[in-house]
Image (cartoon, rainbow, N blue to C red):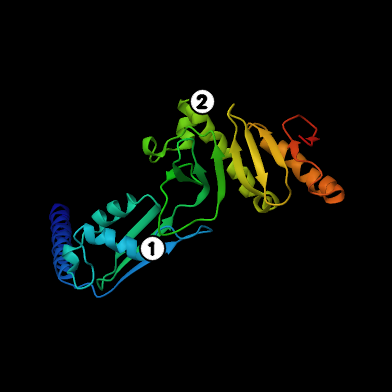
Amino acid sequence: MKKVLKILIVLLWIALTGGLIYFTGFANIEHDKVVCNRYDIQIDYGNADTLVTSNDIYDLVKRTGNLLKGQKTGNIDIEKIEREIRRQPYVADVNAFMHLNGDVEIRIIQRQPILRIFNHYGESYYLDGQGRLLPLNPAFTTRVLVATGFIPESFSKTVNYKTDSIQEHDSTDYNGVMNHLYRISIAILKNSFLKAQIEQIYVTEDGNFELIPVVGRHVIYLGDAQNLEEKFDKLIVFYKMGLNKIGWNKYNFININYKNQVVCSKR
């Protein structure tokens, strides 16, 4: 009797599983016939200016062979759409999904440029907050820190360059300049006072770094990107306790590279 009961239970589970598979397959077939009546593309720009628009993204979607609106859901390849959008240089992350009623939503996070670079060869490009190089967009300009001078990094050779991986595995001078620029930019942007005061980073011929402020006719000699917190703490104190009293144009060269002191001159 117990053996018969076990057999009946097993047969019942097989029947239930088969039914579930059948109805799931039937539901999928029916859903594939649903027509997409609406799509929505939203882009999170964070604190950055616009570099890519919803129209740009839809153009990418069309290149995958998906028109979305008016298209049967069974013919819409969501994974292919995501892959194509992810290749767009200004896109940090993308999530595309389809609702049961056929509507398609695409959610995008744009990369955040932190520095515009003018290198030694006349090229210009962006460095973003994740340490990646981005091309310029002729349709939009982005208000960020500017780096000029003797910068050897060529954008054409380093698309999708990532500072962290270079820093870990490559210690050559060629990549060292970009690593320092990245660290200096991040440190400036983290401090509201410095973010408002510093507008340009200049790389000297010997690979050191100078800062050009918005207010005052002086140049700030930083040296390299070592001990940035200590250097910037000294600079802020000097600005607030020194230049506020004696005048912002008193000196034209401020050196914060020495330990525990700020050296000024009228070079």
Query: How many other residues sit within 10 Å of disc 1, few (<14), some (14-19) or many (≥20)?
Result: few
Q: Cα distance, mark 1 to mark 2? A: 37 Å
Disc tally is 2
For the residue labelled by badge 1, is the local secondary structure a helix, a strand or a loop? loop
Q: Residue at x 65, y 51 (%)?
A: 195
Mark before the other along the chain sequence, 1 or 2: 1
Residue 240, position in %: x, y? 81, 49
Q: Residue furthest front?
A: 267
Q: Is residue 13 left or right of residue 262?
A: left
Q: Quadrant of the C terminus?
A: top right
Q: Residue furthest right?
A: 245
Between 230 and 13, which is closer to the camera in this rendering?
Answer: 230
Q: Residue furthest bottom?
A: 37
Residue 182, position in %: x, y? 54, 40
Q: Which residue is mark 2?
A: 173
Residue 19, position in %: x, y? 14, 64
Residue 157 lies, with reference to residue 27, above or below; the image says above
Residue 101, position in %: x, y? 25, 73
For the residue labelled by badge 2, is the local secondary structure a helix, a strand or a loop? helix
Q: Residue at x 79, y 37 (%)?
A: 266
Q: Is residue 51 left or right of residue 15?
A: right
Q: Is residue 247 left or right of residue 122?
A: right
Which disc is residue 53 wearing?
A: 1
Q: Is residue 128 left or right of residue 197?
A: left
Between 170 and 244, which is closer to the camera in this rendering?
Answer: 244
Which amino acid type is marked by label 2? Asp
Q: Residue at x 65, y 41 (%)?
A: 211
Which disc is residue 28 wearing?
A: none
Query: How many other residues sit within 10 Å of disc 2, few (<14), some (14-19) or many (≥20)?
Result: few
Which amino acid type is marked by label 1? Thr
Which quadrant holds residue 208? top right
